[in-house]
């Protein structure tokens, strides 16, 4: 199969899952409710991204986070600079800073999808791990195709956009897979 044909098929699959996601989301009317098409799009996308980089180790890797990962009551805002974190342990930012230094990667905290897209277009990383709620992650991956954006849903504890969580071990597993393998 030619690269051109593969790209057309990929884009068709993305469009199909995105349209199905959109209609299922309208029927669910609940940000925390499970959306099978969001999960299918994410699974398809993540397999495609890992396949795209199978023969190379990306030189420029970024993690893109939503601002709601930070403790809502924290007075040290990290949206302009993640290094403003004082590592108090009330959220996972300190753990993410440890990953940043261990793997020598960039981490950006975005206040919304538009800022996240601008960052990706400006910085052009070879591999991105994006963490967000299902709506922001699905639309972001769809909008940034064909960039290599590996998606991880954040964990909504009580309500969207406030004190969400992320599985650090899942991020570390992907980083290990991508970085610590033979070229």
Image (cartoon, rainbow, N blue to C red):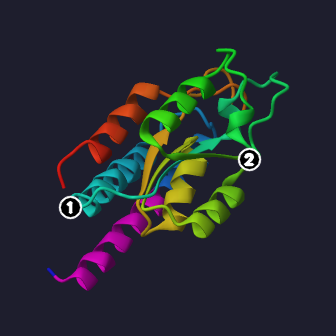
Residue drawn at (70%, 29%) of the image: 70
Q: Main secondary structure of the magenta part?
A: helix
Q: Earlier in the sequence, mark 1 or mark 2?
A: 1
- Which of the 4 image quadrants contains residue 95? top right
Q: Is residue 41 above or below residue 88?
A: below
Label 1 crowd bin: few (<14), some (14–19), many (20+), radius 10 Å? few
| Residue 84 on image: x %, y % | 75, 33
Q: Which residue is mark 1?
A: 55
Q: Which residue is mark 2?
A: 111
Q: Locate residue 122 relative to residue 1 in the image: left or right.
A: right
The residues bearing labels 1 and 2 have C-alpha atoms spaced at a distance of 33 Å
Q: State which region is magenta.
A: 2-20
Q: Locate residue 52 relative to residue 143 in the image: left or right.
A: left
Label 2 crowd bin: few (<14), some (14–19), many (20+), radius 10 Å? some
State the residue lying farthest toward the left.
Answer: 1
Q: Locate residue 88 relative to residue 26 in the image: left or right.
A: right
| Residue 65 on image: x %, y % | 60, 42
| Residue 51 on image: x %, y % | 24, 58
| Residue 161 on image: x %, y % | 71, 34
Q: Are marks 1 and 2 in contact (CB under 8 Å)?
A: no
Closer to the camera in the image, 175 or 46? 175
Closer to the camera in the image, 174 or 31? 174
* Picture quarter with the N terminus: bottom left
Residue drawn at (36%, 73%) of the image: 12
Residue drawn at (23%, 81%) of the image: 3
């Amino acid at each position: 199969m030619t690269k051109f044909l593969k790209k057309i098929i990929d884009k068709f699959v993305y469009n199909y899952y995105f349209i199905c996601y959109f209609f299922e989301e309208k029927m669910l009317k609940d940000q925390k409710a499970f959306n099978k098409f969001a999960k299918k799009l994410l699974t398809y996308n993540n397999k495609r991204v890992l396949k795209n980089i199978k023969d190379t180790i990306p030189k420029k890797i970024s993690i893109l986070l939503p601002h709601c990962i930070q403790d809502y009551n924290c007075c040290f805002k990290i949206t302009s600079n993640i290094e403003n974190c004082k590592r108090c342990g009330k959220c996972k930012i300190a753990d993410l800073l440890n990953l940043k230094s261990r793997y020598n990667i960039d981490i950006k905290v975005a206040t919304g999808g538009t800022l996240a897209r601008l960052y990706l277009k400006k910085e052009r990383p070879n591999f991105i791990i994006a963490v967000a709620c299902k709506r922001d992650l699905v639309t972001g991956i769809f909008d940034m195709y064909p960039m290599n954006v590996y998606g991880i849903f954040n964990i909504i504890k009580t309500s969207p956009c406030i004190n969400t969580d992320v599985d650090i071990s899942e991020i570390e597993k992907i980083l290990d897979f991508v970085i610590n393998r033979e070229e």
